[in-house]
């Protein structure tokens, strides 16, 4: 519990977790750090609904709670940034569980597109190794200037920022366009026809890769 914050005063572990993470925006700050460190300005840009003073407050609270820490980015980026601590990384399966539960809810009004970090968490949330058909492949996702590698091996998925030395395939797209193919039922061929998705490399690997992330089943009927 961080000094000066309100507490539920409940000894239950859930209540104590909410003492740390229950403030608005706290878990979304954690989500934005899953793929690696970010500067304050990057966090602010990727959380467009958060006020600057609120972001500063959440970062201080999460740092005091041992969820994140400050670091210095190496050259050429340089500068101060924030990254998850080992305790903060322990929250990744919590994010995945919340994502699975929340993905079954209908969409409310959407004011901005999913960030690359949120998309990476979403991939891990819905990944179904049984649908990958034993796929063992590295697929690079070029998402509007942000590059991540999705590696499937032995039925497990790892998503990280960076590049793969010898990727099996590469998909160039925006997050929005790839979401349409993955979870909105748009055929890949249609997206390729209008250029919103470009595929390089082994097409068989791409097809099996895309099938590994099935759309969630709505809890209360189809999403609007």
Image (cartoon, rainbow, N blue to C red):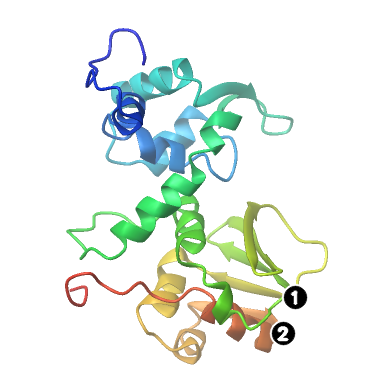
Q: Residue at x 52, y 81 (%)?
A: 211
In-image side of 50 versus 60 (left or right): left
When asked about the image quadrant of residue 198, the answer is: bottom right
Q: Is residue 146 left or right of residue 98?
A: right
Near-viewer residue (203 or 14):
14
Residue 125, x across and y down, in percent = 46, 60
- Could you say where residue 135 lies in the image, as x and y percent from the top left? 68, 78
Sooner in the amino-acid sequence: mark 1 or mark 2: 1
| Residues at discs 1 and 2 in contact (Cβ within 8 Å) | yes
What numbered label is drawn on residue 202?
Answer: 2
Alpha carbons under labels 1 and 2: distance apart: 6 Å
Q: Does residue 90 sit above or below 162 in this rendering? A: above
Residue drawn at x 57%, y 21% as measured from the top left: 70
The disc placed on residue 168 is: 1
Image coordinates of residue 95 in percent, x first then y, are 42, 47
| Residue that sits furthest to the right in the current view | 165
Q: In the structure shown, which secondary structural element does the residue marked by tag 1 occupy?
A: loop
Which image quadrant: the C terminus? Answer: bottom left
């Amino acid at each position: 519990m961080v000094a000066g914050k309100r507490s539920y005063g409940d000894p239950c572990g859930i209540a104590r977790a909410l003492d740390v993470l229950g403030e608005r925006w706290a878990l979304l700050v954690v989500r934005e750090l899953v793929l690696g460190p970010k500067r304050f300005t990057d966090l602010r840009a990727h959380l467009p609904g958060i006020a600057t003073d609120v972001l500063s407050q959440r970062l201080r609270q999460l740092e005091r709670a041992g969820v994140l820490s400050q670091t210095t980015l190496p050259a050429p980026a340089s500068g101060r940034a924030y990254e998850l601590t080992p305790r903060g990384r322990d929250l990744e399966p919590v994010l995945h569980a919340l994502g699975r539960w929340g993905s079954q809810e209908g969409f409310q009004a959407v004011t901005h597109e999913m960030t690359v970090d949120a998309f990476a968490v979403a991939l891990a949330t819905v990944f179904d190794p049984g649908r990958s058909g034993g796929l063992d492949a590295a697929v690079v996702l070029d998402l509007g200037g942000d590059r991540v590698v999705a590696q499937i091996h032995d039925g497990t998925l790892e998503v990280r920022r960076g590049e793969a030395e010898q990727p099996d395939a590469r998909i160039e797209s925006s997050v929005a366009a790839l979401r349409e193919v993955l979870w909105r039922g748009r055929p890949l061929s249609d997206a390729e026809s209008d250029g919103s998705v470009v595929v390089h490399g082994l097409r068989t690997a791409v097809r099996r890769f895309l099938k590994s992330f099935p759309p969630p089943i709505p809890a209360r009927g189809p999403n609007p």
